[in-house]
Amino acid sequence: MRFWTRALMFAAVAALSFGFAAANAGERVTLNLGFVILRSVSLPVVVFASALIGMLAVFLVGLRADLRTRELLQRYRRALEEREKPPV
């Protein structure tokens, strides 16, 4: 059941993305990045690129927290192993 739910959600996102790109294919925008100005950039390219950059940022922020959590769990595991060792 979980596989079909994921597959259906992926298909829905893909269909919405395709529909957005098709509906806005002719739209051109000017992109001012502060240090460079890009003229006549396709709107779907700007939207999808910004979504990918946002996903990358979330991944990097989450990676830092994940590494901290792993380190903490390893310390707890080592402490438990030391605690459970029989006395010599």
Image (tube, helix red, strand yellow):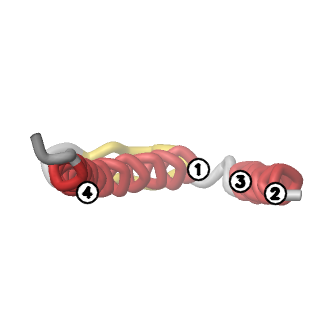
**Residue 36, x across and y down, in percent:** 20, 44
Which residue is label 4 attached to?
69
Disc 1/disc 2 C-alpha distance (Å): 31 Å
Residue at the spot x=30%, y=53% of the render?
Answer: 66
Disc 2/disc 4 C-alpha distance (Å): 27 Å
Q: Earlier in the sequence, mark 1 or mark 2?
A: 2
Which residue is label 2 attached to?
2
Circles 2 and 4, Cβ within 8 Å, touching? The answer is no
Which residue is label 3 attached to?
17
Disc 3/disc 1 C-alpha distance (Å): 9 Å
**Residue 33, x across and y down, in percent:** 23, 52
Does 76 sit left or right of 27 as displayed? left
Does 34 sit left or right of 52 as displayed? left
Circles 3 and 1, Cβ within 8 Å, touching? The answer is no
Q: Earlier in the sequence, mark 4 or mark 3?
A: 3
Comparing labels 1 and 2, the label whose residue is closer to the camera: 2
Tell me, yes or no, if residue 23 can be seen here. Answer: no
Comparing labels 4 and 3, the label whose residue is closer to the camera: 4
Circles 4 and 3, Cβ within 8 Å, touching? The answer is no
Q: Looking at the image, is 35 positioned above or below residue 13? A: above
Element at label 2: helix
Residue nearest the viewer, comparing 14 with 22: 14
Disc 2/disc 3 C-alpha distance (Å): 23 Å
Residue at the spot x=66%, y=49% of the render?
Answer: 26
Q: Earlier in the sequence, mark 3 or mark 1?
A: 3
